Every structure is written in C-alpha cells, then in structure tokens.
Amino acid sequence: MDELRSIVMRAGNTWTDTGLSHVTMVRAEACADRVYQPMLHLVLQGSKTLSIGDQVLDYAAATYFLVPVDVPATGEIHSSGPGQPYLAIGLALDVKVIATLLAGESEADARPNTGGFSAVTAPAEMIDAWLRMMRLINRPREAAILAPMIEREILFRVLQGPLGGMLREIARPEGRLSQIRRATLWIREHYTEPFRVESLAAMSDMSVAAFYRHFKSITAMTPIQYQKRLRLLRARWLLLFDPQDAAAIAFTVGYESASQFSREYARLFGMSPVRDAARFRSAPASGGASVMDAGVSESLSRVSSSG
C-alpha cells in the first residue's frame, strides 16, 4: 500500500490519466460532487463519504467499490492528516473484458448480486495486482503486454468477492443493469427536458412497475430524483463559472420555478444558491484545500455528456 500511495501522489487534484488503458488515479483535497461513471474504485488513503440517492456511504482506505451505471453523487473527501490527501485508483469497466472472464463459467461459480454501492475490504491478492499494474506507468512497452492481463486479474478478484454478482450483471448485454443504463444515458443527454416514466420504461423493455423498481434499486434514486441531481450538479457548476444569476441558471437547467430550484438546491447542498456561490468565490485560490477541485468542476461541466 505504501508503494501504491507513493505512485498515486503524482496525480493531480482530479482524475488523472496514467497512460494505462482504463486506469486513472486521483489525489483529492475537496468535495466529491460529480457524475460517477461505471468504474471500480480502490481507496488507498483517506476516506470518502458519498450521498447517492437516499444512501449515505463511507469508503475507507483499503476498500473498493463498484459504480455500475452513471450516477450523480455529492459528498466529501476526508484526508488522513496534514500532507496525507485522499488517494484512489479507478478502473473503467469494459464490458467486453468482463465478458471474456465469464466465458464457460457455470451457474455454480456465480455469486449473488449484493446490489448497492457497498464498500468491500480489498484482499491482498487484489492489492498486489494493482501494485504490479501501477508499476507499469512510464513503461509503455511492458504495459502493452502486461496491463491487459493484470486488468483481467483485478476483475477476476472482484468476481470472486462480494461484488462479483454486480460485475456479472454489468457484463450481461440484456441484463437489468444494461436496460437501466439506456434510461440513465437518455436522462443525462436530455436532463433539461421533462419526460414520462412510461417512455423510459418502454426504452428499457420493461413494464412501468418493473422499471421503477429496478431503476431505484440500481441508482438509489427514482428517475425524477436522478434528473434533479443532474440539474442541481450542473447548476452548481454554472453558479461558479457563469455570470448568470441564480434565477436564470434555474431556467437554464430545466426548472420552471426559481423558488423551487432554490429550495431543492438548499436541501441538497445545505445552503441557498446565492450563499453557496459566494462561499466558492471567497475560497482561497491556493494554499490548503479549495472548496471545489478542478476534477469536480470538470465533471459538473459535462453533466449532459454521455461519455
């Protein structure tokens, strides 16, 4: 773990490309508000508290968790102390790679889907595989051969653990996760527009009742709550980087009532849009943790993208 931390300390205060396919790393010192895309996260140092829908989750060092679909989340980063920022590694989930590991697998090998966004203690074998992966940074010739094999090994370790069922669901092209992901991608691309749940259910090839149940089970939100989170995250970014006033921003992100926007914004972020914007703008430009890091602002600026 010490060697892994020393490697990840090179990361910027945002998710940083490592030069290894699907692998990113982060050294964070601020809040964790962003749209999380399907990824395996391993926490190396510090901890993170995330609010995803009606769930509040804590992720400590030496634990991993899976994000199965795009989910808007808010939260906080907690360092381990002075000079010990939050450190983590991410592996973007490639359905094709996961599917190759499932080929020939019997039903007896499969584990049940535990669901949720649970934190799981990383076994020594997984940490060892991650260390070998991260040692390949700046070794492109070795990485071209070894990194894909180590990626498969890391995913194999996940399949053997409590979150193996969820990883299997991600790889099933006609599984519930894939069906719900069609809806989440549509909402992300059209987050300012009203929609009917019936249309999203048809898009996902489900009945309305089944769609509603599975959507909330997978994202911890109803479809309307999911859209509201996207709108509010985008609004927060606009408050920071756009000269419009709060009422204009409310209409920009799809609200028909500025007062409703202010109420829902305060409910999520703990203060009114005007006060929140003033707090951000009065934060020191350097020296110590900023209120919002570059990675968060970049993520919020791309809320409407489907990447």
Image (spheres, rainbow, N blue to C red):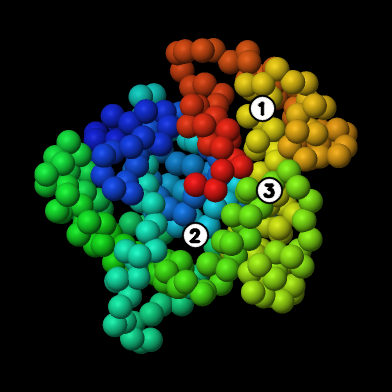
Residue 202's image quarter? bottom right
Q: Is residue 207 above or below residue 183?
A: below
Q: Nearer the viewer, residue 148 or 203?
A: 203
Q: Amino acid at mark 2?
A: Pro
Is residue 53 at all visible to an observer of this figure?
no
Q: Quadrant of the N terminus?
A: top left
Residue 277's image quarter? top right
x and y percentages locating residue 42 in the rendered image: 36, 49
Circle 2 crowding by C-alpha within 10 Å: few under 14, some 14–19, many from 20: many
Q: Residue at x 67, y 75 (%)?
A: 206
Badge 1 is on which residue?
238
Badge 3 is on which residue?
190
Residue 201's image quarter? bottom right
Tell me how many marks there are.
Answer: 3
Q: Nearer the viewer, residue 62 or 112?
A: 112
Circle 1 crowding by C-alpha within 10 Å: few under 14, some 14–19, many from 20: many
Q: Amino acid at mark 3?
A: His
Q: Residue at x 51, y 12 (%)?
A: 285
**Label annotation for residue 68:** 2
x and y percentages locating residue 280 in the rendered image: 63, 20
Which sits earlier in the primary sequence, circle 2 or circle 1? Answer: 2
Which sits earlier in the primary sequence, circle 1 or circle 3? Answer: 3
Q: Amino acid at mark 1?
A: Leu
Q: Residue at x 17, y 47 (%)?
A: 143
Label 2 SS = loop
Q: Is residue 293 above or below residue 212?
A: above
Left or right? Give the position of 141 relative to 168. left
Label 1 SS = helix
Q: Nearer the viewer, residue 37 or 11?
A: 37
Q: Are marks 3 and 2 in contact (CB under 8 Å)?
A: no
